[in-house]
Image: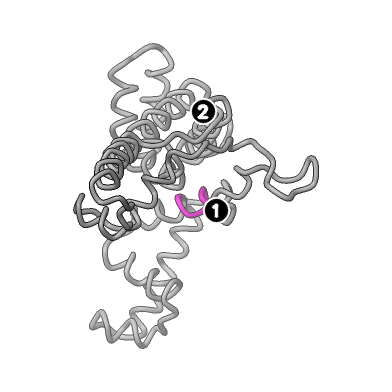
Amino acid sequence: MLDAEKIKELVARAQAGDEQAKNTLINENSPLIKSIIKRFCGKGLEYDDLYQLGCLGFVKAIKNFNPDFNVKFSTYVVPMVIGEVKRFMRDDGAIKVSRAIKSLNLKINKYIEAYTSENKTKPSVEQIAKHFEVEEGDVIMAMDSSRMPVSLYAPLENGEQGSSLVIDGVDAQYNDESLMDKIAVREILTGLSKRDRAIILMRYFYDKTQSEIAEKLHISQVQVSRLENKILNGLKKKLS
């Protein structure tokens, strides 16, 4: 993992036209890009396309980042990547259907046509799934993919004029701010030692008492208390 100073150095070099520095930043931050685009998986875009959009947003973040912003580069990256994906969805118009689903749908249609011609009745979803050795849910999804795609920026059905759009309902419970908070917390925890990370996770994420943690780590409760205070003080300095 690159430290803050190294990241600033690489960003400055990349802004000056150093392609190697830019590629290093992209490679080192690939897990971050993947964690951001994950929220858009299953929304009609191929994963590879999402990742390319994420990288495009990341490159724009490199170009526009200013150390005087007084924010971590990774924090600045998040809204830039999200914005790039949302912009593509807005400009592209409708939700795309993956190539795999389109291919399965074509095969299913040919099978239904042949089956109906031979048996004078249409096959059931169960029969189709068994024939193609896929889940019944995959069959239904593939057959539904032939319907007219819906624009992400169309008004919700039965909504009043000027009310919410379709995209407003996509992962509404995960707004950009909460996503940045989660990524920031993960970065902080990743920077801790294995023991310190275990203490923080058990204490603040799993509601374990200091005594329970001490028993788990085979140390005294007093040691846990001291370690906890030391870790928290270190985190406060890092965030200040």
Q: Position of residue 52 (x, y in %)?
A: 37, 28
Q: Nearer the viewer, residue 188 or 78?
A: 78
Please tell me which residue is depicted at 30% across the width and 50% down the height of the picture: 120
Q: Position of residue 49 (x, y in %)?
A: 37, 31
User: Mark 1 or mark 2, which is nearer to you?
Assistant: 2
Q: Secondary structure at mark 1?
A: loop
Task: Kindly identify the amino acid type of the residue bearing the numbered disc 2.
Answer: Phe
Q: In the orientation shown, which residue stands out farthest toward the top?
A: 17
User: Which quadrant is the N terminus positioned in?
Assistant: top left
Are the residues tagged 1 and 2 within 8 Å (C-beta)?
no
In this figure, what is the number of numbered marks?
A: 2
Task: Kindly identify the amino acid type of the residue bearing the numbered disc 1.
Answer: Tyr
Please tell me which residue is depicted at 45% across the width and 34% down the height of the picture: 96
Magenta span includes 147: no
Q: Is residue 14 visible?
A: yes
Mark identifier at residue 88: 2
Q: Closer to the N terminus: mark 1 or mark 2? A: 2
Residue 100, above or below 119:
above
Q: Position of residue 111 (x, y in %)?
A: 25, 43
Please tell me which residue is depicted at 35% across the width and 39% down the height of the picture: 3
Q: Position of residue 232 (x, y in %)?
A: 46, 65
Residue 97, above or below 220:
above
- Report the magenta residues as a range: 179-183
Mark identifier at residue 174: 1
Please tell me which residue is depicted at 41% across the width and 76% down the height of the picture: 206
Q: Is residue 29 visible?
A: no
